[in-house]
Image (tube, grey):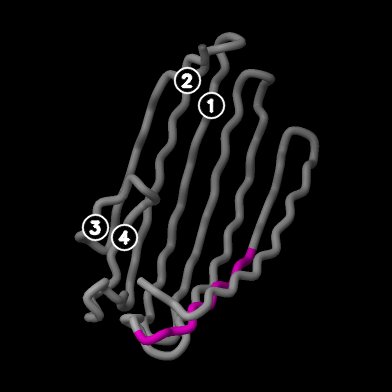
């Protein structure tokens, strides 16, 4: 995708209350089309995010987050994503982690060839396009050398 210009504005903040951290952010991204763009006019993406993190013990932290993105202009895609994660430190260099996410998409999205299709869910760089809903779970051990 090419664009004549890309404008991004974002604001966010967080607040800590004892072992709990609350946070939220909002961003607005605008892409103006150029001669090689597959979209016309200005494509806009508004995103809102909120999260809560709980430090249960010095070794255990857990978090929950929600993100919503809405496209407007040339397309009408809407994405809802809920994420959950935890990390448990077992030593100075080793920890266990688990992450799960669910995303649902609706509306339309533009393809690289200029056509549109029903919006498809894709969770980060892990996602696999093809459906309007997607779930992901990851568990692992991290050891730092």
Residue highlighted by disc 2: 96
Left or right? Give the position of 18 relative to 34: right
| Residue 108 located left or right of residue 15 | left
> Hey, which quadrant is residue 100 in on the image?
top left
Residue 87 badge: 1
Cα–Cα gap, marks 2 and 1 = 6 Å
Sequence-wise, which precedes: disc 2 or disc 1?
1
**Residue positioned most to the top:** 91
Corner quadrant of residue 116 = bottom left
What distance separates the C-alpha of mark 3 from that of mark 2?
A: 29 Å
What secondary structure is marked by label 3? loop
The residue to which callout 3 is attached is 129
Q: Nearer the viewer, mark 1 or mark 3?
A: 3
| Residues at marks 1 and 3, CA–CA distance in whole angstroms | 28 Å
Residue 31 belongs to magenta span: yes
- Residue 14's tag is none
Seen in the picture, residue 26 relative to 90 is either above or below; the reply is below
50 left or right of 81?
right
Q: Earlier in the sequence, mark 3 or mark 2?
A: 2
Q: Position of residue 81 (x, y in %)?
A: 44, 56
Q: Residue furthest bottom?
A: 41
Residue that label 4 marks: 121
**What span is colored magenta in the figure?**
26-35
Q: Is residue 120 above or below residue 96?
A: below
Identified at 44% across, 77% down, the residue is 3
Callouts 2 and 1 close, C-beta under 8 Å:
yes
């Amino acid at each position: 995708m090419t664009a004549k210009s890309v404008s991004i504005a974002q604001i966010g903040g967080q607040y800590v209350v004892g072992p709990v951290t609350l946070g939220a952010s909002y961003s607005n991204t605008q892409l103006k089309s150029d001669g090689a763009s597959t979209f016309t006019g200005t494509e806009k993406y508004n995103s809102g995010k909120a999260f809560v993190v709980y430090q249960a013990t010095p070794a255990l932290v857990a978090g929950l987050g929600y993100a919503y993105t809405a496209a407007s202009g040339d397309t009408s895609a809407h994405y809802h994503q809920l994420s959950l994660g935890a990390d448990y430190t077992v030593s100075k260099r080793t920890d266990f982690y688990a992450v799960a996410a669910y995303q649902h998409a609706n509306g339309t999205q533009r393809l690289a060839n200029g056509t549109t299709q029903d919006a498809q869910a894709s969770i980060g760089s892990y996602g696999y396009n093809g459906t309007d809903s997607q779930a992901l779970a990851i568990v692992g051990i991290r050891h730092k050398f």
